[in-house]
Amino acid sequence: MTTGTRVLVLNAGSSSVKYQLIDMLDGSRLASGLVERIGELSGRLLHLPLTGEPRETVRRFADHDGALHAVADELAADLMGLDSPELAAIGHRVVHGGLRFTRPTLITDAVVAEIRRLIPVAPLHNPANITGIEVARSIRPDLPQVAVFDTAFHATLPEYAARYAIDRKTADEHRVRRYGFHGTSHQYVSRATARLLGRDPAELNVIVLHLGNGASASAVAGGVCVETSMGLTPLEGLVMGTRSGDVDPGLVFHLHRVGGLTIDQIDDLLNRRSGLLGLCGDNDMREVVRRAQDGDDDAKLAFDSYVHRIRRYLGGYYAVLGRVDAVAFTAGVGENSVEVRAAVCANLEELGISVEPELNAVRSREARVISPSYGRVTVAVVPTDEELEIAQQTFALVHEV
Ligand SMILES: Nc1ncnc2c1ncn2[C@@H]1O[C@H](COP(=O)(O)OP(=O)(O)O)[C@@H](O)[C@H]1O
Ligand SMILES: CC(=O)OP(=O)(O)O
Ligand SMILES: [Mg+2]
């Protein structure tokens, strides 16, 4: 079908695009980078070629379309442009796949239409994913493009975990159920944790804590996801950078009926003005920790709420799994915040969970164990690599006969 060995992966977020060009023969990164603050006055493109200096461009990127063309130009400048015959396919992260997409999928007009139909249940993400697909298809209409869905890994949730306890007819009519997100990361990290421990994923029970801008937890039993904290949309569950996570759904009626807020205003409140940002005015965990350490009460409350919510899920998933072999911290906060990891695991010796302060303080890009050797549960930091996972699933699909 294709002779190329390279896959370009596009991970378009609400205000950013991350990309990697990977050679599938040896897994090497030929180039990677990100465009951030898309739509704002001062955006930034950081391109990291395989060899040579990183290139930084600071200017306004009005929209995703402009940002993606700038990425194509950077790759072309390295003589690895989208016109390269060595490119086998382009893999796209797509956040919501609904009921229909539970496997990597070759993109057609009908697939794009279905991803578009799902925008109301992933309003921050699916629109950006579609733009990424459209720009890539316009530049290389001949090349296979593959969508890899955040929801796919969670398709194995048992029915009693996936259902909300609401009227079944209404739920079925509107396809209301818990889908879960960040699945590509939960899948990659649960397997990488097994690798780190030298164990077979099929015999390992892992709790994965993906703590990035969006944040979610999952319980993975023998390689199969059995619980996850996000639901119909990426709003349920943990406290996030700007998202509230779990709230009493009655809050929506209250703010509407008594507070006079419209549904769109409540949507904006819970998705964009809540979480750490809502509690203390900062959504970056580095800033929250710095302020909390300086004695700022709002930042301390935000930090404590964030950690408390994770601990509730950690305890809950312990009960769901019955036996836990490992807890894996991943994504921006999970991989970098010594303070969050220490606070999440504090006083859990009765559950066999603890971290060794010296190991926890190590700064590294490598997967590593941070629990003491006597710990019944291995606590680990396992850097996620959604792009590599997407590239592998994309390459495998285009080589299926
Ligand atoms: N050194 C650090 N300490 C604490 N938090 C960090 C650190 N570095 C990054 N982060 C957090 O990671 C978040 C981004 O995580 P990331 O996984 O890249 O998010 P996403 O992929 O969802 O955009 C930032 O908002 C920031 O709060
Ligand atoms: C689904 C989701 O929340 O993704 P992100 O963390 O990239 O915002
Ligand atoms: Mg992410």
Image (cartoon, rainbow, N blue to C red):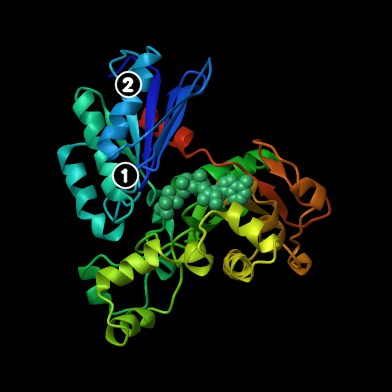
Q: Position of residue 369 (x, y in %)?
A: 73, 45
Q: Amino acid at mark 2?
A: Asp
On the image, numbered disc 1 is attached to which residue?
39
User: Is 17 situated left or right of 174 in this image?
Assistant: right
Q: Residue at x 54, y 66 (%)?
A: 280
Picture layout, residue 369 above or below residue 118: above
Of 135 and 316, the residue lying toward us? 135
Task: For mark 1, give the secondary structure.
Answer: loop
Q: Residue at x 37, y 68 (%)?
A: 269
Q: Amino acid at mark 1?
A: Gly
User: Is 201 situated left or right of 378 in this image?
Assistant: left
Q: Position of residue 122 (x, y in %)?
A: 31, 56
> Residue 317 bears which disc, if any?
none
Q: Residues within 10 Å of mark 2 (few under 14, many from 20)?
A: some
Picture layout, residue 157 above or below residue 102: below
Q: Residue furthest bottom?
A: 258
Q: Residue furthest right?
A: 374
Q: Residues within 10 Å of mark 1 (few under 14, many from 20)?
A: some
State how far apart marks 2 and 1 are (Cα). 19 Å
So how many labels did they put on this image?
2
Task: For mark 2, give the secondary structure.
Answer: helix
Q: Quadrant of the C terminus?
A: top left
> Residue 73 bears which disc, if any?
2
